[in-house]
Amino acid sequence: MIVRWETDHDYVLVHVHQDMFGDWIFSRAWGQIGTQFGGLKHQLADDYGQAMMWLEDEKTILGSRGFTKVLEADDHSPEGREAMGQLSLLDGH
């Protein structure tokens, strides 16, 4: 699952997925739209439920900061693949 929020100048993109070992990974990218300023952090969740709890926390925090959700997609959808391409650029792959 990929979710993206934006303001006029900033974005946050969250990717929740399983790695090849079956572990749940919560990846969060953030930055300024149109620039290369930002960051990327990966966290290992105990299970899917914890990853979803982190996603809900993110939704609450970003909503309180004026961010609007602009994308929620499956990894395999065209939109999801495009967002993954952007995430890969930040990760240096």
Image (cartoon, rainbow, N blue to C red):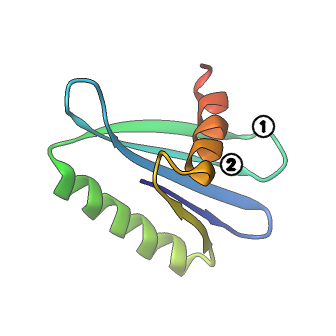
Under circle 1, the secondary element is: loop
Residue drawn at (19%, 32%) of the image: 22
Under circle 2, the secondary element is: strand
Between 49 and 38, which is closer to the camera in this rendering? 49
How packed is label 1: few (under 14 Cα within 10 Å), some, or many (20 or more)?
A: few
Looking at the rendered structure, which numbered label has been put on residue 31?
A: 2
Q: Position of residue 84 (x, y in %)?
A: 57, 40
Q: Position of residue 21 (x, y in %)?
A: 20, 24
Residue drawn at (42%, 64%) of the image: 58
Distance (Cα) linking label 2 and label 1? 7 Å
Image quadrant in which the C terminus is located: top right
Between 75 and 61, which is closer to the camera in this rendering? 75
Question: Residue 46's image quarter?
Answer: top left
Question: Residue 60's image quarter?
Answer: bottom left
Assess whether mark 1 and mark 2 are in contact (beta carbons under 8 angstroms): yes
Q: On the image, numbered disc 1 is attached to which residue?
A: 36
